[in-house]
Image (spheres, rainbow, N blue to C red):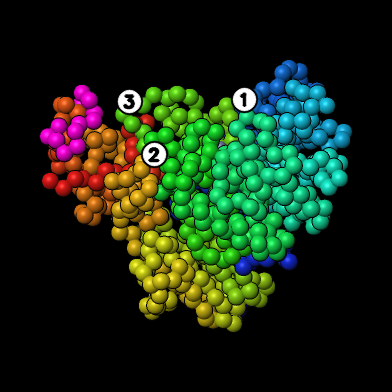
Amino acid sequence: MAPARTALTSLAAPAVPTPDAAVALRPLDPGRARITGGFWHTRQQRNRLDGLRAGHAQLEASGTLRNFRLVAGTETGEAAGMIFQDSDVYKWLEAVAFELGREDDPELRTMAREVTDLVASAQLEDGYLNSVHTLRHSAEERYTNLAWNHELYCYGHLIQAAVALARSAEEEQLLDVALRIVAHLRTVFGPGLRQATGGHPVFEMALVELHRLTGRPEVLDLARFFLDVRGKGERFDQVRFGPGYFSADVPVRETVSVEGHAVRALYLFAGATDQAIEDRDEELLARCEAVFADLLATKTYVTGGMGARWDWEAFGDPYEMTTDRGYAETCAAIGAIQWAWRLLLATGKPRYADAIERLLLNAFLAGVSLAGTEFFYVNSLQLRDGAKADEGRSIVHGRRGWFDCACCPPNVMRTLASLDHLVATQDAHGLQIHQYASGTWSAGEGEETLTVSTTTGYPHDGRITVRIDAAPSAPRRLSLRIPAWSRGRARLTVDGAEATVPADQAVVVVEKEFAAGEEIVLELDMTPRFVGTHHRLDASRGAVALERGPLVYALENEDQDEGVTVDDAQVDPSAVPEAGAGLDTLDGAVPLRLAGSVVRSSPAAEAWPYPVHGSADAELERTAHTWTAIPYFAWGNRSVAAMRVWLPVQEQS
Ligand SMILES: [Zn+2]
């Protein structure tokens, strides 16, 4: 039968490798990935209807948009905010571009055009564009402080917005601005010119994407130059924090483990993976895979959060992962998702889709309120009773509408708006579904198109129904990821008949001649489970974390009895937690009831908290208690009170 036309939208993937690129999997074509209902759709609609509009108001209120008017001369005054303030506008524009691709909205389109005009009006004659730098510094000072002045970083975000506007929204004005910037950069940087790069990566992956869109080889050459000059030549040796902070201690190709500022490192390696894909550079890809594996093994929280240190917003040493001071910036989760998605395209390995799932539903999603308009910058795994906020980013404040350094909010907006394409990919044989969301996905061309619709209550429910909407009259492959947490415990039925799911496989492949109307049902095991911790992870030793399906859980005081605090919790991991009815106050999130106790220290230990080991003073008074846990991403939406992910194991008496 003829394939159904499903290109209801023009939303394009955030990274689209060229036809010659070395990838195992390709993004679905524009308009062929669409989340239409369920958990993520709710989040996307709030982002679309409320988040983006609130973001625009914040860009105006913070003076960020006004900075461009000051350069254009339509207003007078002094520049507002951070030297990289322009980037907030570009990330917001990119988010709007994706939203216009999901579904047109005349009001949003008008806003995007006005902001684009404003940005274009601040570009100088020679192509240079940075409103704050132009207002605060002389022309001679351009690129004299590459470590901190973020000129290349801002270009990177502008280019990403320009690519998204062109691909998903058919708006090309910002693309002209981007190409003028590239022409300008090629007069300053490159072989025979300045051998240096910028302190904050992102422009590497942006330039690769601009090359992918325009086919211009000189743009890919410039991306490769910036990638390879890092860690050589001008290496940020003389500036505060030194080269390690900037991921410039050694060249990318010699890196063993990420270090320094987390978001810088993650954006850099996402770009390096793009470069490896386009250059068909197997050695560079292998390096990216090895560094990612080390990152997961030694520097990632159970939530997927990355970057343990408040100091420098940086990765800690291996296994240095405090829970109460854990930083885990929202932008770092986003950078890691971007990197993992590129590794998934390059290799097809389901481990990267597993990583994306953990990052998306825990580290990333905690970064935005259920309403979609307030944000956490930092995503610690514990908030203690009596905690005091020491600065604006502190979780003690709860989520906030904006920040002095507002990197995270518009980063969340663009991630939510482009989520549809992280769900599924295609190859010559068919369609691969990596993430579970209700929607419609199409792979292949013309008569070969395979279109499916998925329906699921994921992540709170483990049943996923895949309905064939249209299929060619030839065998195709449909593959479904079995998440690591359900491997060996998944059930599959194909058109009513039970099918075998090999226990050791991360992906189940159904290959056959599909017929429209046929249904495939995957059931994942949602039994709650406790996870432990590596012996070197001091901060969570002797404790367990609770997971159900893809979600990490937390105890929050809001759900406990009056007068009881989660700071005094111990749990009994031998008792299987019970799932309760979905909570209306948390969009249907499923609470879990855990057996355990409330503990109290001896009077001696209350006075001096280091009793002699094994003495009577070291004994705890314990009262049996049932604790209630909620998904970590949902904490801090009702009140801001004590919360913890890691739960001390109840000592045996
Ligand atoms: Zn951020």
Q: Position of residue 247 (x, y in %)?
A: 62, 43
Q: Tell me the CA gap for discs 3 and 2.
A: 16 Å
Q: Is residue 482 positioned above or below 274 on the image?
A: below
Query: Considering depth in this image, is 458 or 485 the residue closer to the camera?
Result: 485
Query: Label 3 to label 1, Cα distance in Å?
Result: 31 Å
Query: Does the beta carbon at disc 1 come under 8 Å from ligand 1?
Result: no
Q: Is residue 526 above or below residue 41?
A: below
State the residue position of label 3: 386
Residue at numbered disc 1: 62
Say what secondary structure mark 3 lies in.
loop
Crowd rating for badge 2 (residues with CA inside 10 Å; few <14, some 14–19, many 20+): many
Which tag, 2 or 1, sits closer to the chain's start? 1
Q: Nearer the viewer, mark 2 or mark 1?
A: 2
Q: Find the distance from the CA under tag 2 to the CA under tag 1.
A: 32 Å
Q: Which residues are magenta?
A: 606-617
Q: Residue at x 79, y 53 (%)?
A: 221
Is residue 190 visible from the viewing direction of this image? yes
Q: Name, please, the residue furthest toward the top.
A: 77
In this picture, residue 583 sits left or right of residue 30: left
Residue 62 position within the rendered picture, expressed as x and y whole percent measured from the top left: 62, 25
Ligand 1's quadrant is: top right
Give the structural element (helix, strand or loop) at label 1: loop
Seen in the image, is 225 located left or right of residue 320? right
Q: Earlier in the sequence, mark 3 or mark 2?
A: 2
* Amino acid at the residue labelled 3: Gly
Residue 599 in view, yes or no: no
Residue at horizontal 37 percent and vertical 51 percent from the top: 534
Which is in the foreground here, disc 3 or disc 2? Answer: 2
Q: Looking at numbered disc 2 in the image, what kind of residue is underneath it?
A: Thr
Look at 79% across and 42% down and name the residue there.
Answer: 195
Q: State the mark number for residue 109.
A: none
Could you tell me residue 113's position as x and y percent?
Answer: 73, 39
